[in-house]
């Protein structure tokens, strides 16, 4: 392909995403699988948003944050999956540089926003369990709106920094990314610029978005567990309201940490097993978890189930 002949950043127009397989039959199977997963993801999250929106009994801080999480669950995969579906059918694995940068920006934006949002959701549960008498005074809708604004603006700033770094890079080829999406580490490897400063800037800007929220979430649950020790009879009921959030945090941060540790290995290691492993982990991180999140929050939540049934009857 002509773009593989390019020798510098000014002439780079495309990258080649190798994806999962070049076999036409396998690509059709993958197309059907990803199409089903994506449709389920969209339907589940949209239904949850509509159920909360149209049920006044769910107009409280916890569900306000849940709507924001569902928006993230929709926007993140939507930056990746539609292009994958088109590529499975067309066989064209190329992606223009601008689309690659946009994909990374949205991936950074949604990932960072989810990290921060999970902190505020943990804080909401902490106040509800540890300071129930002051809950309505502390966690007001204006406070929730401020938290959501901080979430999106902070993530937007760090995402913009990473994309600014990418646009300053020089690429000398080959422009082949052995993944199904554009990632920052892969572009660092493909660059013929000195990336030591760029990597340091990206780490300083991004690491706090992952680590500080995790520490705050752990601290919140430490306080919650310490508080419910003295609650007789109501201990299970008090902690059960945290269970969906705790499951989501475990899945999200567990896979995020593995991805963070493995990704630098995968881009430098041509081992098929290592490359396949990082693709599978990334697949769960960017597509499967966003599909599961609304189900995790809904299946054992009687209020949400009631709202969903009411929504279906309205249709």
Image (cartoon, rainbow, N blue to C red):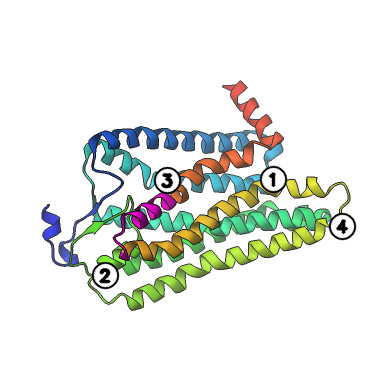
Which residue shows up at 23% across the image and 36% down it?
24
Residue 6, position as x, y percentages in the image: 13, 62
Q: Which callout, 1 or 3, points at the residue further toward the start of the chain? A: 1
Asked whether 273 falls inside the magenta stretch, the response is yes
The reply, left or right, for residue 132 in relation to residue 60 is: right
Task: Look at the image and tell me in which quarter the C terminus lies.
Answer: top right
Which residue shows up at 42% across the image and 62% down it?
262
Give SS at disc 3.
Answer: helix
Give SS at disc 1.
Answer: loop
* Residue beneath disc 4: 230
Q: Is residue 89 above or below residue 141?
A: above
Q: Is residue 40 above or below residue 69?
A: above
- Which contiguous range is marked in magenta? 268-283
Q: Nearer the viewer, mark 2 or mark 4?
A: 4
Which residue shows up at 52% across the image and 69% down it?
208
Q: Which callout, 3 or 2, points at the residue further toward the start of the chain? A: 3
Q: Nearer the viewer, mark 3 or mark 4?
A: 4
Task: Give the Cα separation between the discs numbered 3 and 2.
Answer: 26 Å
Q: Which callout, 2 or 4, points at the residue further toward the start of the chain? A: 2
**Mark 3 Cα within 10 Å, few/some/many (few <14, many 20+)?**
many
Q: Which callout, 1 or 2, points at the residue further toward the start of the chain? A: 1
Task: Give the Cα separation between the discs numbered 1 and 3.
Answer: 27 Å
Task: Give the Cα separation between the discs numbered 1 and 2.
Answer: 45 Å
* Residue beneath disc 1: 60
* Residue beneath disc 3: 77
| Quarter holding residue 134 | bottom right
Task: Give the Cα separation between the discs numbered 3 and 4.
Answer: 42 Å
* Residue beneath disc 2: 169
Is label 4 in contact with label 1 (beta carbons under 8 Å)? no
């Amino acid at each position: 392909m002509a773009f593989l002949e390019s020798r510098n950043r000014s002439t780079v127009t495309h990258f080649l995403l190798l994806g999962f397989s070049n076999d036409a039959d396998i690509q059709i199977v993958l197309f059907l699988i990803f199409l089903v997963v994506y449709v389920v993801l969209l339907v589940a999250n949209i239904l949850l948003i509509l159920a909360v929106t149209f049920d006044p009994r769910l107009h409280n801080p916890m569900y306000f944050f849940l709507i924001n999480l569902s928006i993230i669950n929709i926007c993140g995969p939507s930056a990746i999956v539609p292009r994958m579906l088109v590529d499975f059918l067309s066989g064209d694995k190329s992606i223009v540089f601008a689309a690659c940068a946009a994909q990374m920006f949205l991936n950074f934006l949604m990932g960072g926003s989810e990290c921060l949002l999970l902190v505020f959701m943990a804080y909401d549960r902490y106040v509800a369990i540890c300071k129930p008498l002051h809950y309505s005074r502390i966690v007001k809708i204006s406070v929730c709106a401020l938290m959501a604004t901080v979430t999106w603006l902070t993530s937007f700033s760090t995402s913009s920094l990473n994309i600014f770094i990418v646009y300053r890079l020089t690429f000398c080829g080959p422009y082949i990314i052995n993944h199904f999406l554009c990632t920052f580490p892969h572009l660092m490897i493909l660059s013929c610029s000195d990336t030591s400063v760029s990597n340091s800037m990206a780490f300083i800007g991004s690491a706090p978005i992952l680590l500080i929220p995790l520490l705050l979430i752990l601290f919140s649950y430490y306080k919650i567990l310490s508080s419910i020790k003295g609650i007789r009879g109501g201990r299970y009921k008090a902690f059960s309201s945290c269970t969906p959030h705790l499951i989501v945090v475990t899945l999200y941060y567990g896979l995020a940490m593995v991805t963070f540790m493995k990704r630098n290995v995968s881009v430098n290691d041509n081992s098929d097993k290592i490359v396949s492993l990082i693709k599978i982990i990334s697949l769960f991180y960017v597509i499967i978890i966003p599909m599961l999140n609304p189900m995790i929050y809904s299946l054992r939540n009687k209020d949400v189930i009631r709202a969903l049934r009411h929504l279906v009857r309205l249709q």
